[in-house]
Image (cartoon, rainbow, N blue to C red):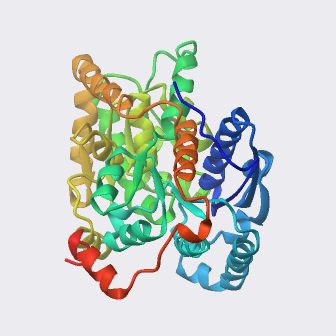
Amino acid sequence: MNSQPQFEKRELSVCIVAGEASGDAQGALLVKALRAELDASGVRLNAWGSGGKLMKAAGVETLVHIEELSAMGFVEVLTVYPRISAAAHRLGNALSLRRPDITVLIDYPGLNLRLMEDAFHLGSCVVYHIPPKVWAHGARRAARLRDSSYLVTCILPFEEALLKRAGVNARFIGNPLKDEISDFLSSVEKRKSANSNQTLVGIVPGSRSGEIEKVFPTLVQAFVRTRRASAQELKAVVPVANTVSRSHLESILLRELAQEGAEKLRADFELVSESSLKSVLSECSYAWVCSGTAALETALLGIPMSVVYKMHWMSYGIAKRLVNLPHVSLVNLCAGRELVPEYIQDAATVEALSAHALAILNSPEKSDAMKSELASLRGVFPEHSARNAARAILECYGQLPSEPAHRFHYKSARDVWREEREWGLNQ
């Protein structure tokens, strides 16, 4: 049973900063959980910062709207830099003037790593909720988190150990995606497929134009090959992200079908809104999924699958040098072992993708075995991630000295060098 922390203040000022839509969603969940915990202690929450419509609806005073911070790509960032810079200065000034008790930064490292350091040296209890991918971007980010935050709340299980090894006070609190899917699965059993005579195969090509150009043609070809080799009546469902042009996907699809001499199979492909990703994939017997959050979502749904990813050969070469991980997909990284096959770069061939799909589709035993393995992944994530994060944040705040000036100290270059050598950060 959770014991409520005791606070000297009757109101807590909390600055919470999200920079994009996903952060807005997680920020709203966290604010609701913080308010519920504080209400139980008789403390009022005064939340303000940067967010979108969801955080605003949750009662956050949005000094900066996430639309002011949105930009994709290097050229786009340059063209909107004055707008982003002005928004960043507005948040920085608010930190200086309002001196929040707690500062919560959600992902979005380009802005939030800088705000983290500013808030820390103002004496705020700094928490990084959903940290930048230190496992993909090297140890320097881990060092910044270690030196300028009091707590990092992680939503991926392997992040906690990695960050603790770098000296960061990290806590794995579960994943909001797991909570969403648990709620979804509790009701999905009541629903049935509209056409039980068809076997649905999911094709999830990603949400960025670059990865779609690399991956989607191969997946279309793999489905055509699988469709021709299967005795079942297969139909492909393709979730379309809101960042992707449906007409662009359609043009790629028609081009690949024409090259395969399979124009008549166009009726076997259905392009659907990604907002219904869970509903669509829950009825699939198999799925090819571009590596990313969608792969973890598919795995948590328990859909037999494989992970596919391709990128520019030069980008892949650089990534291999920078990232030293045993797996690529979040599914296998979270499980700590290979639950699903990964077809990356040159390994992502039409033949290999089709062979694995057919092996699963043609064997109920193999399909059930993979479903059982994927079900074990759900046990890795605790329930109620937002509540867990809220409790960890308030517990951290309650353990700090009451005087903000006593909460931090500046480190000399020699101190930083010594600690980085101790933690292996400058090897």
- What residue is at 34 percent from the left and 58 percent from the top? 163
* Drawn side of residue 211 relative to residue 329, left or right: right
* Drawn side of residue 336 relative to residue 254, left or right: left
Q: Position of residue 349 (x, y in %)?
A: 24, 52
158 or 239: nearer the viewer? 158
Q: Position of residue 360 (x, y in %)?
A: 26, 28
Q: Work out whether residue 163 can be spotted.
A: yes
* Drawn side of residue 94 relative to residue 386, left or right: right
Extreme residue toward the top, this view? 190
Q: Position of residue 98 (x, y in %)?
A: 75, 68
- What residue is at 42 percent from the left and 49 percent from the top? 257
Q: How many marks?
A: 0
Q: Is residue 19 above or below residue 198?
A: below
Q: Work out whether residue 261 can be spotted.
A: no
- What residue is at 53 percent from the left and 80 percent from the top? 74
192 or 331: nearer the viewer? 331
Q: Is residue 383 above or below residue 67?
A: above
Q: Quadrant of residue 310?
A: bottom left
Q: Position of residue 311 (x, y in %)?
A: 34, 66
* Drawn side of residue 382 relative to residue 402, left or right: left
Q: Is residue 407 above or below residue 155?
A: below
> Is the C terminus in the top left, top right, bottom left or bottom right quadrant?
bottom left
